[in-house]
Amino acid sequence: MLDVCLLGSGGMMPLPYRFLTALMTRYNGSSLLIDCGEGTQVAIKEKGWSFKPIDVICFTHFHGDHISGLPGLLLTMGNADRREPLTMIGPKGLQKVVGNLRVIAPELPFPIVFKEIEGSEQTFEMNGYRLKAFKVNHNVLCYGYTLEIDRNGKFDVERAISQNIPQKYWSRLQGGETVESEEGVLTPDMVLGPPRKGIKLTYTTDTRPVSSIRENARNSDLFICEGMYGEKEKAEKAVEYKHMTFYEAAGLAREAEVKELWLTHYSPSLTRPEQYMNEVRKIFPSAKAGRDSMSAKLKFED
């Protein structure tokens, strides 16, 4: 199961009722944060989640509304006596940008491991999931992210028995481990059926609609996508500043055949996103207007 929380749904500037952009996930004892806008610490506290398990922080790009909350978060993590390494993933220049922000957080009791994304897309394997960064189209270098958790095939007891595989090895094989035993090398494919459907989450913001989003979001269980503007008269503004409208996001969701769409990264002038959702749902019925602390538990299918 993957816990997902949209910590902040605002773009450009925080509002009394809306924090800036941040998404947090929890899986298997580890937590991942994508973007860290102003107010992220407060949002995590309000959600009742912990800073301590955060072991990966990703950035879509380096505009202030996506990274301005980082120095304070690092100080809080340091004050909690964290010692474990923290991995950061982001566009080229990540280490330099974070280094500059750390002028006000110079001493930390834990190391930071920087992974700057190479090229138009790159995949990282960590903590039991696969994280893929893919380039989108904003006025600075910007990436979206897809998080996937694979699921092995179902364990076939009859096959294990017929091959005289001792029961003491079953759980290890079921977990995908290759076992060297007195009976020889035992591999998971000897006892597992075909892979089952896993879990897929896609997050993208600050971009025009592009094919890389459509391709990487395909069949996602949850697609969290920028909807900067709900007002149809602001379509030209979305093009000029390389953002997206609610309707463009809904179109991508439909084309990518995702299960559910959450809109996020609203313009400060957009105070009531829900009022536009009837029109949005004509394009993609399973669309929701995201809001701060909106959460979901993505589960494996039975």
Image (cartoon, rainbow, N blue to C red):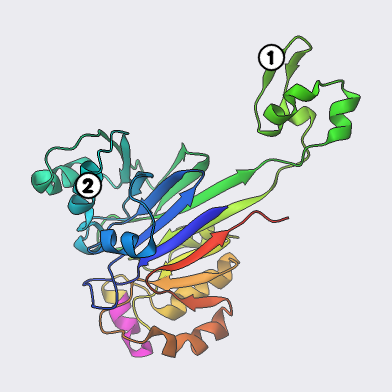
Q: Quadrant of residue 208?
A: bottom left
**Residues shaded magenta:** 231-238
Q: 212 or 187, which lies in front?
A: 187
Q: Main secondary structure of the magenta part?
A: helix
Q: Earlier in the sequence, mark 2 or mark 1?
A: 2
> What element does badge 1 sit on?
strand
Q: Quadrant of residue 16?
A: bottom left
Name the residue beneath numbered marker 2.
Answer: 74
Q: Is residue 188 left or right of residue 58?
A: right
In the image, what residue occupies the spot 46% across and 46% down? 131
Q: Position of residue 275 (x, y in %)?
A: 42, 90
Identity, as a three-letter code, of the amino acid under mark 2: Leu
Q: Is residue 228 left or right of residue 110?
A: right
Task: Identify whether 10 is placed above or below 165.
Answer: below
Task: Identify whether 133 is placed above or below 18.
Answer: above
> What element does badge 2 sit on?
helix
Task: Identify whether 187 is placed above or below 213.
Answer: above
Q: Are marks 2 and 1 in contact (CB under 8 Å)?
A: no
- Whole-angstrom CA distance, mark 2 to mark 1, is 43 Å
In the image, what residue occupies the spot 11% across and 40% down? 106
Q: 46 or 289, which lies in front?
A: 46
Name the residue beneath numbered marker 1.
Answer: 180
Q: Position of residue 297 (x, y in %)?
A: 55, 60
**Is residue 227 at all visible to an observer of this figure?**
yes
Circle 1 packing at 10 Å, graded few (<14), some (14-19), many (20+), is few
Q: 279 or 185, which lies in front?
A: 185
The stretch drawn in magenta includes residue 175: no
| Residue located farthest toward the left when viewing the structure as drawn | 103
